[in-house]
Image (tube, rainbow, N blue to C red):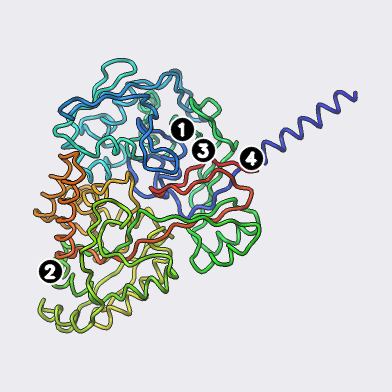
């Protein structure tokens, strides 16, 4: 009887211990989908790419150094046009309530995943609209000639030209590997659309459920091929308001919060139950002008907007000094940043003269879309919009502020429905190409990542030429020239490069700020 009682108590203690390993993360928004092939925002990537899925190559935790992942090794041909990946054996796909795999990861899954984006005739290419913003914005369709299975655990990717950042690109979230067997299963039951919203991957956590705008739940993948996650359950508590996130952290409802409000950071640092960590952000926040719409097709108008914005006041009022004014589309922490560029000064008189010269002596009416979620490059889009509105009123530009929920905001911006729009970017791979080509290259106009919808031949020729060389010196020279063209043509008003902050309970261990902007929990523990 005593033995039975002891076992009952022991079982209860074990259950309590397991429940204590539930880690709650207060995220800032709802994911737009659960497949990084079809998303670009950090909110969605945190809920899928950094939890559920894996890529052939990965970045070492907390750095931009490349490390093997689903590919245990690779070779590159002498002409730098062919990459052969040797795949890891024994990798299991997730078992979920909606799918039970019968085989392990192999070459078929890689070929399926990449060809879904590459091949317009692929059975899954047009599922859920067939929009692959990263793939298209990075011109991968013209770069990747073929993806071939050359063995059960060997895949060859052939390019049409050498591409210096290609290996780093394979570590990006949009190159995540899906299960072909799961896709075949969905085809059989006529639910192909589920592939982007009910995910099956190989990563550290398994998708459990999602309640829109409220919560995402994951459980630990106990059959993970590598070192298993330290927490048993992971919960994303969707909390758009930064002040509410802070309250949840203080009351113990969350263990870690994203993007604490700058105004709360000092108080957080004084709280003995909270720790705050920070790091230089590989990011840029900007106001993009849709150059395909009047009056922003006129470079004089774009320059006038640049002169009218008092960016220093934004750093003080919005970031509380935890950022620096941006003059380039690249952050200063990335190689090839052009220090010699001169920014547009805050000059109302000059802005008015430029508007008059452009044919708008009395200004004009316009819409400005304000960011609906807290992002590292813009902690308060609404407040910034109000200050911008006041600044532009001084030159006769009457601004109507508009916003949408985050998924709608992103979709409408991809479709070019905006005039002025607040956005930003955190680098994905530490290469300047990831900023200049993705955000400002001509292929990004069609792909949707270039929201300025600006296609300049001189600029584009330079960044395309830079891709062909592995010589950092040559690439740096080309990128510096490209930044000069960008500044002269002014498709954006560059706003800020911000410091990244995360706040967490004192008992959170193992968390590192990702220089590429993600929140990654496979090494996080509660002590």
In the image, 200 versus 433, the foreground residue is 433
Q: Quadrant of the N terminus?
A: top right
Tell me whether circle 3 and circle 2 mark residues in contact (CB < 8 Å). no
Q: Is mark 3 on a helix, strand or loop?
A: loop
Tell me whether circle 3 and circle 4 mark residues in contact (CB < 8 Å). no
Tell me whether circle 3 and circle 1 mark residues in contact (CB < 8 Å). yes
In the image, 240 versus 247, the foreground residue is 247
Upstream in sequence: badge 4 or badge 2: 4
* Disc marking residue 298: 2
Tell me whether circle 1 and circle 2 mark residues in contact (CB < 8 Å). no
Q: Is mark 1 on a helix, strand or loop?
A: loop
Q: Which of marks 4 and 2 is in front?
A: 4
Residue density around tag 3, few if under 14, some if 14–19, many if 20 or more, within 10 Å: many
Q: Name the residue under label 3.
A: 522
Q: Quadrant of the C terminus?
A: top right
The percent coordinates of residue 75 (x first, y second) are 26, 24
């Amino acid at each position: 009887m005593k033995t039975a009682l002891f076992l009952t108590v022991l079982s209860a203690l074990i259950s309590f211990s397991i429940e204590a390993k539930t880690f709650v993360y207060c995220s800032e928004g709802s994911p737009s989908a659960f497949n990084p092939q079809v998303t670009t925002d950090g909110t969605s990537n945190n809920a899928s790419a950094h939890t559920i899925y894996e890529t052939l190559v990965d970045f070492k935790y907390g750095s931009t150094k490349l490390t093997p992942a689903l590919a245990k090794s690779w070779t590159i041909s002498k002409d730098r046009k062919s990459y052969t990946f040797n795949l890891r054996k024994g990798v299991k796909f997730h078992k979920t309530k909606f799918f039970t795999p019968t085989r392990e990861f192999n070459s078929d899954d890689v070929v399926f995943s990449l060809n879904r984006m590459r091949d317009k005739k692929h059975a899954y290419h047009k599922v859920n609209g067939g929009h692959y913003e990263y793939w298209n914005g990075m011109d991968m369709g013209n770069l990747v000639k073929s993806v071939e299975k050359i063995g059960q655990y060997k895949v060859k990717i052939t390019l049409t030209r050498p591409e210096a950042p290609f290996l780093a690109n394979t570590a990006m979230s949009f190159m995540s590997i899906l299960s072909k067997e799961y896709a075949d299963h969905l085809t059989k039951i006529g639910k192909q659309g589920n592939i982007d919203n009910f995910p099956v991957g190989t990563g550290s956590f398994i998708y459990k459920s999602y309640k829109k705008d409220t919560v995402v739940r994951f459980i630990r993948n106990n059959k993970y091929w590598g070192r298993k996650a330290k927490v048993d359950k992971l919960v994303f508590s969707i909390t758009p308001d930064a002040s509410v996130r802070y309250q949840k952290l203080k009351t113990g409802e969350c263990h870690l919060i994203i993007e604490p409000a700058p105004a709360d950071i000092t108080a957080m640092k004084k709280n003995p139950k909270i720790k705050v960590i920070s790091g230089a952000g590989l990011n840029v926040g900007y106001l993009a002008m849709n150059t395909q719409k009047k009056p922003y097709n006129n470079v004089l108008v774009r320059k006038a907007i640049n002169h009218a914005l008092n960016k220093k006041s934004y750093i003080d009022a919005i970031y509380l000094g935890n950022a620096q004014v941006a003059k380039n589309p690249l952050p200063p922490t990335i190689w090839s940043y052009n220090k010699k560029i001169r920014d547009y000064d805050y000059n109302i008189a000059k802005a008015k003269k430029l508007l008059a010269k452009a044919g708008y002596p009395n200004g004009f009416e316009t819409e400005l879309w304000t960011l609906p979620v807290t992002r590292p490059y813009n902690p308060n889009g609404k407040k910034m919009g109000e200050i911008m509105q006041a600044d532009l009123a001084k030159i006769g530009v009457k601004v109507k502020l508009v916003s949408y929920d985050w998924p709608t905001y992103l979709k409408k911006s991809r479709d070019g429905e905006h005039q002025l729009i607040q956005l930003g970017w955190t680098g994905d791979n530490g290469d300047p190409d990831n900023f200049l080509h993705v955000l400002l290259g001509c292929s990004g106009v069609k792909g949707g990542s270039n929201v300025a919808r600006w296609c300049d031949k001189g600029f584009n020729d330079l960044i395309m030429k830079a891709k062909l060389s592995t010589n950092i010196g040559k690439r740096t020279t080309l990128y510096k020239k490209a930044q000069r063209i960008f500044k002269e043509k002014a498709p954006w008003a560059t706003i800020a490069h911000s410091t990244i902050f995360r706040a967490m309970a004192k008992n959170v261990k193992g968390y590192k700020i990702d220089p590429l902007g993600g929140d990654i929990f496979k090494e996080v523990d509660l002590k």
